[in-house]
Amino acid sequence: MASFRALRRGLVALFRPRQADADVADEVAHYREAAEAEHRARGLDPEAARRAAQMELGGDLAVREQVRTSGWEHVLETTLLDVRHALRGLRASPVFTVAAVATFAVGIGASTAVFSAVRPILLEPLPFPAADRLVTLDDRNAEGFPMPATLGTYDEVRVRARAFEALAAADVWRPSLTGSGTPERLRSRSGLPSASDPPAIWPAANGVIITNSLGGWRRHRALRRHPASCSPSAARRGPTSRGRPGPISRRACWCAPSRRPSPGAPGLRSWPSWRPSLCCSRSRR
Amino acid sequence: MPEPNTDVIQGTLDLLILKTLSLAPLHGFGIARRIEQISRDVFKVNPGSLLTALQRLERAGLLSAEWRSTANARRARYYTLTRAGRKRLEAETTDWKRRSAAVFRLLNAEG
């Protein structure tokens, strides 16, 4: 109730500023005149009484300003005045306005673009259960820099390592997405399937092609919902380990592993920049 | 000898206004003078602070205000304590007595 009253009084002062000013001015004037009359009653001459009252009050205008600026509406009032002043300034110097708007547009656009890239790469979790347990394994050269693991390393780890629930090897592959629409180059990795691999340990296995093309991902988001999208099992029936798969069709699907990989061992690094987001099956020819 | 400080203790202006208006409805100048009289000139109220506080208390529903004509045919805004204001006065008075008693006890403590 009190807040409603404060709101109402503030709105009245906002939309009827003259009335609000007059009320405050009357109250201040009454205070000054009453003080002046009191000083006269004490024996001061009119001029001295007026001066004493003025000294006590400290100036009508200052008191009126103090009272008028104490309400919440003053904040809104000054903000609107600032906005009006800014708009007038912008209208008066169009060159500056265009430069400022262009700067804002470029800044906002750049920030949006950067965030659009950062969000799916770094912030969003991978679309698999226990995605934080997916790791990649690299060899290290003599200088300590990472280098791709060899097949020998893969075989050794497969036989001897106990830190992983399952393993799969993958290779960089850049397929062409063809079919309806403009053909597109995807950044992908092709899996190296093995008969001993458990099915769908993670998307890189069993010949499933995984792309981390952000543009492609955005453009082909609708493919996931397409009635012709293949199932993960259909994706697993895709390419084999012999040679590179051919052009892939626009039949796309999500491939989520049915089993969770084990936690990574020390020395393994996670795979933050490689984002398996879209899985595609090979075209049936 | 320096003049004694006549400023109202910080945070107590609302309490003083509420108490003064609990005695009788008054306009701004009357409230200021009544506070000075009752406090025996220990406190002198700054008019700007007083009118600002009156507006704040009135908006908070603790006071009601109405314009009346004075003897010299001038408009004056008279303030009256509302029921909510009376409740607030009771609460503030209790709190102030508790605090001031604690300060008094501390000042009279002996080692």
Image (spheres, rainbow, N blue to C red):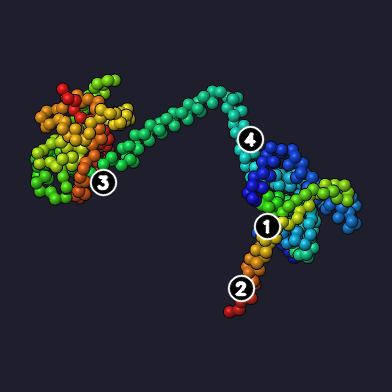
Confirm whether residue A68 shows in the render. Answer: yes
Circle 1: residue type: Ala
Label placed on residue A81: 4
Q: Nearer the viewer, mark 1 or mark 3?
A: 1
Instruction: Estimate how packed mark 1 is, as few (under 14), some (14 to 19) or many (20 or more) residues with alpha carbons within 10 Å.
Output: some
Residue under the image location 82 percent in, 47 percent down? B75
Residue under the image location 19 percent in, 33 percent down? A235
Residue at mark 3: A130
Judged from the image, the secondary structure of the residue bearing numbered disc 3 is loop
Estimate the spatial distance between the alpha carbons at disc 3 and disc 4, rounded to whole Å.
Answer: 55 Å
Judged from the image, the secondary structure of the residue bearing numbered disc 4 is helix
Estimate the spatial distance between the alpha carbons at disc 4 and disc 1, rounded to whole Å.
Answer: 36 Å
Q: Give the chain of mark 4.
A: A
Q: Is residue A108 above or below residue A160?
A: above
Which of A116 and A8 lies nearest the eye of the viewer?
A8
Q: Are marks 2 and 1 in contact (CB under 8 Å)?
A: no
Confirm whether residue B12 shows in the render. Answer: no
Label placed on residue B106: 2
- Percent coordinates x, y for residue A151 in the rendering: 10, 38
